[in-house]
């Protein structure tokens, strides 16, 4: 029996990539049935490209469509919270682009709404998927890597005036933050995905590259729960763009590729401490089957979770962990103190991390 889920995509910027990478490769799992965008020219261009007949500008009309199973939210960040809550209240499954929402208070409200909702919510963290990161994950979880020592995360991209000419970018109300929210959030998720939760953070943010409201440079020193030390740096002023994770363990060095938009894919550098460790890694990965990158695998796993009622590949708890890091970053930069985790209502930035 067919279990094809009908999808409505809201917002056709990154939403087009969801179609191409996430849904089209799985015609036995998904049908993109509705497109919704306030930009009528873009709406018709994307709909024509993929032969999609139902085209709307009104989100409420989508909510009222009984045949739509999944609402995929790809709008500017400032609109996410309201759209998520409406979609969950309408009984739909929800996919939502990063950043999920604009505060820990909002993500906690979403988590509360999920508990009574008919549908399920999956945040997007597509860079978790690819052969490189998944091989690293298997090595670490098998215990071969051993004791974690240190890690570095570098999101060094370039964005200028042309990027910020888009009206909603670079503003607290609509983009919700700068490089921490819209660029480095992916690599920071990958860091905690592989190294585990954070225990403490001392960070600084600055606006040095562009004439915008939000930050475009950031750096931090982290203590992980497992005792490892980590450093983060992010900028939108690097003339050579890289995304790089480098993880030093007792028995192995792991380093990602440097591709800005596909850091999860091979090749990753895996350097064992000795031949014995190398042989264990080779044996562990001997049966490896290729893992398609980014949205392709995340959407496939989402469908499997919906059909089986099993665990989601990315959860709201994962999104909360990412926003916890962001909250701690802004609080630490403003107070010049270390922020300890978990971060909750006691934080001065719990309800909003906008500068005082």
Image (cartoon, rainbow, N blue to C red):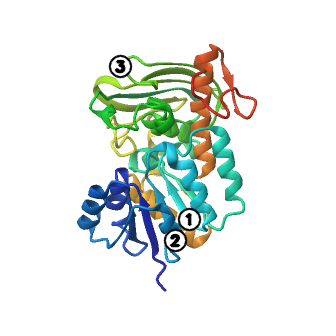
Q: Alpha carbon of mark 3 to alpha carbon of mark 1: how far?
A: 39 Å
Horizontal side of residue 241 vs 256, given as left or right = left
Q: Is tag 2's residue or tag 3's residue first in the polypeptide sequence?
A: 2
Q: Residues within 10 Å of mark 3 (few under 14, many from 20)?
A: some
Q: Nearer the viewer, residue 208 or 164?
A: 164
* Of pointers 3 and 1, the one earlier in the residue sequence: 1
Instruction: Measure the alpha-carbon separation of dots 2 and 3.
Output: 42 Å
- Classify residue 132 by image quadrant: top left
* Secondary element at image label 1: strand
Is 166 left or right of 190, judged from the image as shown?
left
Mark 2 vs mark 1, CA separation in Å? 6 Å
Residue at image point 60% right, 67% down: 90
Q: Which residue is mark 1?
A: 93
SS under mark 2: loop
Q: Which mark is residue 209?
A: 3
Q: Are marks 2 and 1 in contact (CB under 8 Å)?
A: yes
The image shows residue 206, relative to residue 74, as above or below, that is above
Tell me whether circle 3 and circle 1 mark residues in contact (CB < 8 Å).
no
Q: Look at mark 2 in the image and give the residue it sits on.
A: 69
Q: Whole-percent x and y of residue 1?
A: 49, 86
């Amino acid at each position: 029996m067919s279990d094809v889920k009908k999808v409505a995509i809201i917002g056709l910027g990154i939403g087009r990539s969801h179609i191409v990478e996430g849904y089209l490769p799985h015609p036995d799992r998904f049908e993109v049935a509705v497109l919704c965008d306030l930009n009528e020219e873009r709406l018709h261009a994307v709909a024509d490209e993929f032969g999609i007949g139902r085209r709307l500008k009104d989100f409420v009309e989508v909510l009222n469509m009984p045949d739509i199973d999944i609402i995929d939210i790809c709008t500017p960040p400032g609109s996410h919270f309201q759209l998520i809550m409406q979609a969950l209240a309408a009984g739909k499954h929800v996919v939502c682009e990063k950043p999920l929402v604009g505060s820990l208070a909002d993500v906690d409200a979403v988590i509360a709404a999920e508990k009574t909702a008919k549908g399920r919510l999956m945040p997007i963290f597509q860079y978790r998927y690819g052969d490189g990161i998944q091989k690293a994950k298997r090595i670490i979880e098998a215990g071969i890597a051993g004791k974690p020592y240190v890690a570095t995360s570098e999101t060094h991209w370039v964005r200028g005036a042309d990027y910020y000419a888009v009206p909603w970018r670079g503003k607290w109300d609509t983009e919700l933050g700068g490089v921490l929210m819209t660029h480095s959030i992916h690599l920071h998720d990958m860091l905690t995905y592989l190294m585990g939760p954070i225990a403490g953070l001392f960070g600084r943010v600055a606006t040095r590259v562009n004439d915008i409201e939000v930050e475009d440079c950031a750096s931090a020193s982290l203590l992980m729960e497992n005792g490892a030390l980590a450093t983060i740096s992010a900028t939108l002023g690097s003339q050579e763009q890289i995304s790089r994770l480098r993880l030093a363990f007792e028995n192995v060095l792991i380093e990602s590729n440097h591709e800005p938009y596909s850091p999860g894919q091979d090749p990753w550098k895996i350097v064992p401490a000795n031949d014995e460790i190398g042989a264990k890694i080779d044996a562990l990965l001997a049966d490896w089957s290729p893992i398609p990158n980014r949205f392709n695998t995340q959407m496939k796993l989402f469908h499997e979770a919906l059909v089986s009622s099993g665990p989601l590949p990315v959860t709201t708890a994962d999104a909360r962990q990412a926003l916890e890091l962001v909250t701690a970053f802004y609080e630490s930069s403003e107070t010049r103190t270390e922020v300890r985790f978990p971060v909750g209502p006691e934080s001065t930035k719990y309800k909003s991390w906008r500068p005082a």
